[in-house]
Amino acid sequence: MKPALVTAVVALAAAVLLLWRPWEAGYAPGDPTTDGPEATPWLDRLARGIGLEGRGPPYFSGYVDADYVMATSSVGGTLLRLDVARGDHVTRGAPLFALDDAAERAVRDEAQARIAEAEAQLADLLKGKRQPEIDAILAQRAQAEAALAQAESDYRRQVRLRATGTSSAKQLEDATTQRDLARRRLDELDAELEVARMPARADEIRAARAAVAAARAALAQAEWRLDQKTGFAPADGLVFDTLYRPGEMVPAGAPVVQLLPPENIKIRL
């Protein structure tokens, strides 16, 4: 039978039942057996008439799926604290767990001390020698000036004595040597003082700056490892499960808390 013809027959049967129900055999208005809740619904009789009796309501086949979000730590360690329990609702950024971080804190503190030391060394190179060292050079220069003045006085005296024949050539030569030595010593101290007041050489300054940069990089690495010891919620959601208990060893990269964000729940048909 063609589909159009089947549809027409079903529609005709429904109309007949609707129109002829009051006059069907045994029908009595007001009789609960034929005209009340206990009576067989007329739709049931229609279903029997067209062969749909007992099929029930329509339904669809499918399942519920979910994409879980795992809270992990990039570094391993002993689980020190678990801040959530299964069934809790958390918001993004909420603390979830903490691993033992004593070693990481020690490394961080050492890196901070190295930065302070490297920066102090660089500052010292940039400003030259410390003032006490400069003061010591100035004191030596004052002594050298006095020695030069005495040497020049002795030299002039020997020149006069030599001119009168009361002094030997050897005495004049010795006085000349002492005067020249005193002048040379004063020149050396002047050069040393000039260097002391200057900053360090360019290559020394570059090396000191590189040491500061390396110390800062080490501190950044130490702080990153310390931060990894605390786990935070990457998204809003339900704590579906906790996979470790305090005191247990958590390997690096292992999930500690399993979260289920509401938008990650999917119905697949």
Image (tube, rainbow, N blue to C red):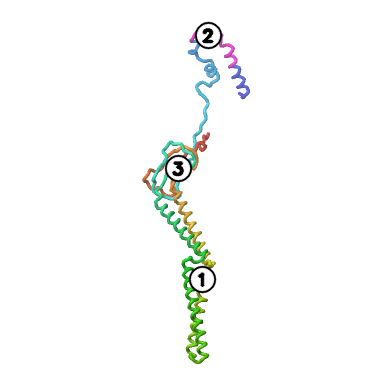
Separation (CA) of disc 3 from disc 2: 73 Å
Proximity of marks 1 and 3: CB atoms separated by less than 8 Å: no
Given the current orientation, which residue lies at the most extreme bottom position?
Answer: 165
- Nearest to viewer (mark 3 / mark 2): 3
Horizontal relation, residue 156 to residue 7: left or right:
left
What's under tag 2, amino acid-wise?
Tyr
Q: Secondary structure at mark 2?
A: loop
Q: Position of residue 126 (x, y in %)?
A: 52, 64
Q: Which residue is labeled 3 in the image?
A: 95
CA–CA distance in space, label 2 to label 1: 131 Å
Spatial separation of the CA atoms under disc 1 and disc 3: 60 Å
Which disc, if any, is residue 67?
A: none
Label 1 sits on what residue type? Leu
Which portion, as a residue range, is magenta? Answer: 14-32
Q: Which residue is mark 1?
A: 193
Of circles 1 and 3, the one toward us is: 1
In the picture shown, does residue 93 fall above or below 161? above
